[in-house]
Structure formats: C-alpha cells, structure tokens
Image (tube, grey):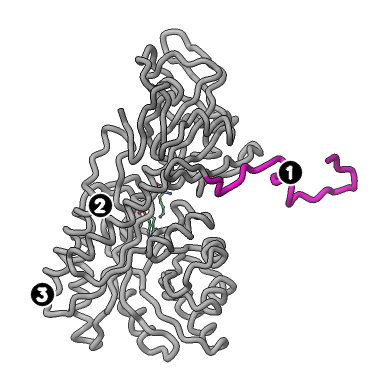
Amino acid sequence: MFFHGTMKVNEKGHLEIGGMDTVDLAGQFGTPLYVYDVALIRERARGFKQTFDKLGIKAQVAYASKAFSTVAMVQLVDEEGLSLDVVSGGELYTALAADFPPERIHFHGNNKSREELEMALKNQVGCIVVDNFYELELLEEICESLAARTKILLRVTPGIEAHTHDYILTGQEDSKFGFDLQNGQAETALQKALNSSWIETLGLHCHIGSQIFDTTGFILAAKKIFEKMAEWKEKHAYEPIVLNLGGGFGIRYTEDDDPIHASQYVEEIIGEVKKQAEHYSMKMPEIWIEPGRSLVGDAGTTLYQTGSRKEVPNVRNYLAVDGGMSDNIRPALYQAKYEAVLANRVLDKPEETVSIAGKCCESGDMLIWDLPLPKAGDQDLLAVFCTGAYGYSMANNYNRIPRPPVVFIENGEAKLVVKRETYEDILRLDLPINEKIKN
Ligand SMILES: Cc1ncc(COP(=O)(O)O)c(C=O)c1O
Ligand SMILES: N[C@@H](CCCC[NH3+])C(=O)O
C-alpha cells in the first residue's frame, strides 16, 4: 500500500488521514477535496532543521511557497520557525496577510515589477534574490527613491543539467533564470552590486531544478560556485556570507521513484560545501535551502468522486472523476505520474485496469493511466496521493470549474483552510457589456 504519514485503513476499510475517515471528510466538505496531513508537514520541516542542527551549520530553511501557498500554510511555516520564499506580489501579500515576519521572507522572481519591489522594500523583507541586470538597476533606483537599504543574493546559473523534466530544469546555461556564472555575467553583477551604497550583497543563490533524486547536480553546482567565489575573493576581496542552494529535492510519487532521504540531500551537500571551503581556504558560508515539494508533496491527498465510465473494447477503460487538470495540471504539463486507491474500499482487490480521466474538455486531461483498481461505480471515492505540491497552487478555472477547498487534518480534527470556490466567485470579476445579468 502506497501510504504516507498518518495514513491508515480503518475497520470499515476506509482510508484514514490524521485520524479522520476520508469518506466522512468527503461527506462533510464535498469533492474534489485537497486534504493535508499537518503532522507530516511538521515532521518534514523539523527533519530539515534537525539535520542542519546536527551538523552544526548556520542555516535557513525557507519553504518555497509556490508549492502551496495559503494563509494557513504560511502560518504553519511560521509556527515551525522556517523562513519563506515568495516569488510574486501575490505570494508576498499572502505572507504579510498571515503576519509572517518579513525579515524571514526571501523575495524571488525573474521579472519583479517596480510595484512588487516597492512592496518588498516598504515591508522590509529579509532578502531580495536578484535575478538579472534589469532588476539590479531597478532595485538600486527604488532603494534610492525610498531611501531604503536592502540585502540581496545574486541568483547565478551554474550551467548544469539536472536529471529531471525539461520544464522544471533551471540551472542550465540556456535558462531564463539568473546571471550566467561562466560567461562573466555573474561577476559583472557582483561588481555592480558591491558598488551600490543601497545594496548589501549577502551572497549567491542557485537553484538547479525540481524533483531531483540525488545530489550529483547540487555537488557540481557547489564546485562551480566555489571556483568562482575563490576567484572573486582574490579579484574583488569579496567573500559571500550566504550560499543559497535552492530546493528541488525529489519525492516519491510512485513506486518507481527512488529519491534519497531529505537529510541525506542536506548531509551530502553540506559535506561538499565544507570540502570546497577548506580547499579554497574560505569561510564556511551560512547555508540556505528552499524546499517546496519535499515539505508538502506527500502530505497532500486529493479526494474525488468517481463518475462516468467509457470502455474502448480491447484498448482501455476510462473512469472519470469530478476534477482533473483544473485541480492538478501536473500530469498534463509534465506527464507526472501518481498512485491512487479507492478510499472507501481500500482493502478490495484490484479487478481491472482503468485510466482516470478528468472532467475538463481536453483529451490530455488524464490524471492517471492504467491504474489497477477494484471495479468502481459512480459513488466511489478515489484518493490520489502526493498532490500536496503544485496541485492547489497551480489550480485554475479552466472550463469555469470552481477550485476545490483545502482541509488541514491534525490529531483527529479537520480544519477548513480554503473554502470551495463558488460559481459566484467565478463571476466576481466579470463585467457585463449591457445591464442584463441574472443572479
Ligand atoms: C528558486 C526556486 N527555489 C525553490 C524551488 C522549490 O523547488 P521544489 O519544490 O522542487 O523544492 C523552486 C522551484 O523549482 C525554485 O524555482
Ligand atoms: N511546478 C513544478 C515545479 C517547478 C516549480 C518551480 N520552479 C512541478 O509541479 O513539478
């Protein structure tokens, strides 16, 4: 059984999460429904922090809120004492609304607008991760106009192809993110930043991609970065105090995925950084990381009601659910794979192989291909595992489908943290071209 965290099967043969029967949750909150196992998120957060503590390394673990950002999630991150990576005015606004301490916010983005940068500076976020020359100049200008100083990291692209899906690679030379480390861009950016009286350059940032299963790419990135840092120490008498190595630690979506343990990523990366620092006789920088998926991915489960079926004789059986690419676009976008069970009949033996179709008007709206399942009718409950990262956060209103609610489960209690969207919500921003509009 592909279970995570507090999941178990109860005496009725139903899937339970955090001591709550998922059939009852579906009854109470409706479907589709995102369910989060809060204890598992806390365990993952503490795991990262404890690994750094054990290694005696000064560190910041910043949750990459793009993976799943809501007020409640940001509050949970604060409770666990992590920092927060935001990548837009909207994520920053959510963090501020949740009363997250601004000094622990890191602001990312490859095209931050003037308004977003002003918002960050006025709210005194802890660090701005500068991505390009345009931003560096804009930031300098805004700092001057607001008479506000700021701390930054320079995002560098080390020229590394991590082993993952092309769309979630970010460290390669041909990438829209960051200053190229090899061709002199990063060094020019550093010189400009060091010349600014408004900007304090804490160090460098590098994120090589997402859903990565080992540390080869991180280690290579650390080597390349240190090589340059040593060069810059000589040339510019500059030594970074912070090295942010990003996120990207992979998780197990299916039995075929085989990532190393979160603590192993950290231990191996730190091992290399220490080695490099010693090799070049440089100070050990403070290490920051930005896990998103590995903090929330397997803590999230989506519950769907099953509905229509279509059989294509000798080819395939389709079973449709009441959601799809509007609540989980990852299969369509990255050919992402998931495991699922019938949450109301977990112990029933598989009787057929079905492909799980979403309800969007799109042939590519398939959630899972060829899943072994007991024969499901139109009243069964399908639980799709590991939907906690980039599910709700990438949800959309395609076909004007309202987005599902989010429920946090902890210690046998369910708390609604995002309400179900309504048809009224969908019309909220629409304006008529004439006055005829029905309620
Ligand atoms: C700059 C940056 N940091 C952190 C993350 C989080 O990545 P993940 O969710 O794979 O840990 C991302 C997304 O890939 C990112 O672009
Ligand atoms: N959204 C992607 C990850 C990339 C995120 C940020 N750079 C996913 O679902 O896997």
- Tell me the kind of residue under disc 2: Ala
Q: Residue at x 33, y 38 (%)?
A: 4
Dominant secondary structure of the magenta stretch?
Answer: loop
Q: CA distance from mark 2 to mark 3?
A: 25 Å
Mark 2 residue element: helix
Query: Going from the N terminus, do you reach mark 1 or mark 3 first?
Result: 3
Q: Earlier in the sequence, mark 2 or mark 3?
A: 2
Q: Quadrant of the C terminus?
A: top right
Q: Describe residue 160's horizontal placement relative to residue 423 as left or right.
A: left
Please name the residue that numbered disc 2 is placed on: 262
Residue 167 visible in the displayed image:
no
Report the Cα–Cα distance between label 2 and label 1: 42 Å
Q: Is residue 204 left or right of residue 24?
A: left
Residue 360 higher or lower than 172, as above or below: above
Secondary structure at numbered mark 3: helix
Q: Is residue 407 above or below residue 269?
A: above
- To which residue does mark 1 refer? 424
The image shows residue 300 at horizontal and vertical percentages of 43, 42
Q: Where 200 falls versus 41 (above or below)?
A: below
Residue visible at 42% across and 61% down?
Answer: 79
Image position, residue 151 (x, y; %): 40, 80
Range covered by the magenta-colored residues: 415-439
- SS category of the residue bearing label 1: helix
Disc 1 residue type (three-letter): Glu
Residue under label 3: 278
Label drawn at residue 298: none
